[in-house]
Amino acid sequence: MKRKLRLSLQIVCALIVLLSLATGCESEKPGPTDITSEGALTLFGTAPLTLDPAIARSEIPITYIVEIFSGLVSFDPEPNLTPEIAESWEMSSDGKTYTFHLREGVKFHNGKEVTATDFKYSLERACDPTTGSQTADTFLGDIVGVKERLSGEVEEIRGIKVIDDHTLEITIDAPKEYFLSKLAHPVAYVVDQANVESGTHWWQNPNGTGAFQLKEWQEDDFIILERNNLYYLEPPKIEHVVYLLWGGVPMRMYETGEIDVTDVYPGDIERVLDPANPLNDELTITPQLSVFYIGFNPAKPPFDDARVRRAFCYAIDKDKIVRLVLKDLVDTADGILPPGMPGYNEDIQGLAFDPERAKQLLAESEYGDAANLPSITLTSMGRSAASNLEAALVDMWRRNLGVEVEIRQLEPEKYAYLIMQEKDELFILPWGADYPDPQNFLDVLFHSGTKDNIGEYSNSEVDALLEEAREERDVTARMNLYQQAEQMIVSDAACLPIYFDVSYTLVKPYVENLPLTPLWIPRLRHVSLEPH
């Protein structure tokens, strides 16, 4: 999405698996020959469209970026907000100014020392309208002067000041409890100005500060990351990470020993969950801080009528979809905030399956009958046949409302970048947390003034609650405001939540300390490999 739009890597990989199966072949492309398996973690990967931290909008590029680059702060596997290049910081009494003290001796991969000026350049570059970032407003928009920079009115952001080489001051427009967490997003990472100005595709040879550096990238074959021996924290325990790109079907590759980690999809889950299967001992189940929903476009008929939106919600039997299509691998979503997220409300009143109520609402709408509805298309990601989930949704709308819905697909790798401009009347949106705060879901996705309000939903009462929550410093009061806003969003059918994701991951026994966290974090520096 987030946002950012954060697309689930599992969803994209699942599409790739289906494409591989559909063609009935697995690629025999050679991998790197000078890297031994003993010293390298080998993973399934997808070629990113960019490695520019300011541009990256989906999980595919960010998977690599968080290992190659870094910023002021990050999250640890717990996840707790932790210092990165900023060794410490203080906040002013009014909660609006942060003074960051940078570690001394932090170096880019080429040995050049990182200073506060590099951060000022990086943040202003991310907000430069010519950069074309789709995430800068969401994650940096609280900083005083960013809006003017994004609109091209100014060259410098007045809320960012260099005090000295190792001291950076950032001032935001109002006290916001979640602001520091936003700086963990890649758009706030530091980049080397000389590297960026070396050419349009500078990111193919990135000079980052992360625990790993890019050693080699053979397009559509493999990406190799190499340990950064200049890393400012404890250096990685493994020397290389090899991503095999479009290498075949991940599950088969895992079972033949080609890769060390894989997600498990519905076609294999029953045997993996069987305690008698040896793979069961290698399985880790991790609830994700994410929600998969169907978005409505109220700017287009018929979803400008809330009764039609509600009708489409009541027509869907989510429990049946989760049970039969998704094989109980995920949790049915009644609301938007996933379990484990602060502010999660297990008592939220969702729009439960009720086909009679759905027909009644459609009859009460300005259209009166399904026959009077304009054509409706669901924007999805893919390259071939619709997914089983999409087919089930379309079938339920047909059976329970008498409505025909077409499906139009966008390329999975480009979906996050195109969906705002190319969405139809309905669209799919997998959204995962960038930081563990309800603001990252409710405000970012449903406030009428945000860039990531893909559905262009607008409700002045919801806006007022979300704006009050932004500056509320009492935790309990703040969570109550978000719960009120969430209930209004759900009742108004701003979207159709389907499920909260759960990750099923197989990890080889010799891979130790791999964090399986729901957040984007630099995780590979924690990994060690036992002899195998």
Image (cartoon, rainbow, N blue to C red):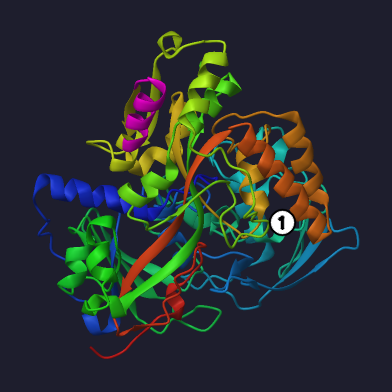
Nearer to me, 522 or 357: 357
Image quadrant where residue 344 sits: bottom right
Residue 55 percent across, percent down from the top left: 49, 46
The residue pinned by badge 1 equals 179
Nearer to me, 90 or 450: 450
Side of 432 relative to 319 (left or right):
right
Range shown magenta: 392-404
Which residue ends up furthest to the right in the rendered image? Answer: 93
Which residue is pictured at 73% across the width and 44% down the height? 484
Residue 226 visible in this rendered orientation of the protein: yes
Q: Is residue 228 magenta?
A: no
- 305 lies above or below 30: above
Q: Label 1 sits on what residue type?
A: Phe
Which residue is pictured at 61% across the width and 78% down the height? 105
Query: Mark 1: few, some, or many residues within 10 Å (few <14, many ≥20)?
Result: some
Image quadrant where residue 417 sits: top left
Q: Is residue 393 magenta?
A: yes
> The residue tagged with tag 1: helix, strand or loop?
helix
Q: Which is the main secondary structure of the residues drawn in magenta?
A: helix
Residue 78 percent across, percent down from the top left: 57, 74
